[in-house]
Image (cartoon, rainbow, N blue to C red):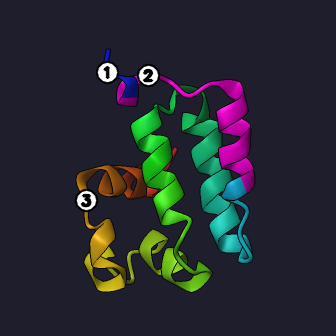
Amino acid sequence: MQQDEEPIDARALSKLRWRCRRGLLENDLFLERFFQRFGASLNHRQANALGDLMELGDNDLLDLNLSRKTISQVQTQLDRKDVHEILRMLKENP
């Protein structure tokens, strides 16, 4: 298994959750649901992609979560397969 595909450990998951705290409640709701569903199985590649998304401002992130904008409209450097995967996971309904 490649290192990118290995699951992150509990400490890295805790740090990632802390980093994902947002200023808008709506984003926090998307992220909390994401961590409840996928937190235990996140790998390094996915964690890095989520970390890259967290560099966005709250309004841009919310626009992506609500599909009001596409990633290429918000930031072209993030228009990558791994980021699209995380966005799909964030939007996925239980």
Question: N-terminal of the two: label 3 or label 2?
Answer: 2
Image quarter of the N terminus: top left
Range of residues picked out in magenta: 4-18
Q: Residue at x 29, y 85 (%)?
A: 73
Viewer can see residue 20 = yes
Q: Find residue 89 and report its horizontal and vertical position in percent.
A: 43, 49
Residue 80, numbered circle? 3
Question: N-terminal of the two: label 3 or label 1?
Answer: 1
Q: Residue 31 in magenta? A: no
Q: Cβ–Cβ below 8 Å for labels 1 and 2? A: yes
Tell me the element at label 2.
loop
Sort mark 2 into few (<14), some (14-19) or many (20+) by Cα contacts within 10 Å. few
Measured Cα–Cα span from mark 1 to mark 2: 7 Å
Residue 6, numbered circle? 2
- Residue 30 position (above or below residue 55): above
Which of 35 and 93 lies nearest the eye of the viewer?
35
Q: Main secondary structure of the magenta part?
A: helix
Sort mark 1 into few (<14), some (14-19) or many (20+) by Cα contacts within 10 Å. few
Tell me the element at label 1.
loop
Q: Residue at x 41, y 51 (%)?
A: 86
Q: Residue at x 74, y 76 (%)?
A: 23
Q: Find residue 67 and report its horizontal and vertical position in percent.
A: 38, 75
Q: Amino acid at mark 2?
A: Glu
Q: Amino acid at mark 1?
A: Gln
Q: Find residue 7 and report its horizontal and vertical position in percent.
A: 50, 24
Write down the residue under mark 1.
Answer: 2
Give the foreground label among 3 and 1.
Answer: 1
Seen in the image, is 75 located left or right of residue 12?
Answer: left
Tell me the element at label 3.
loop
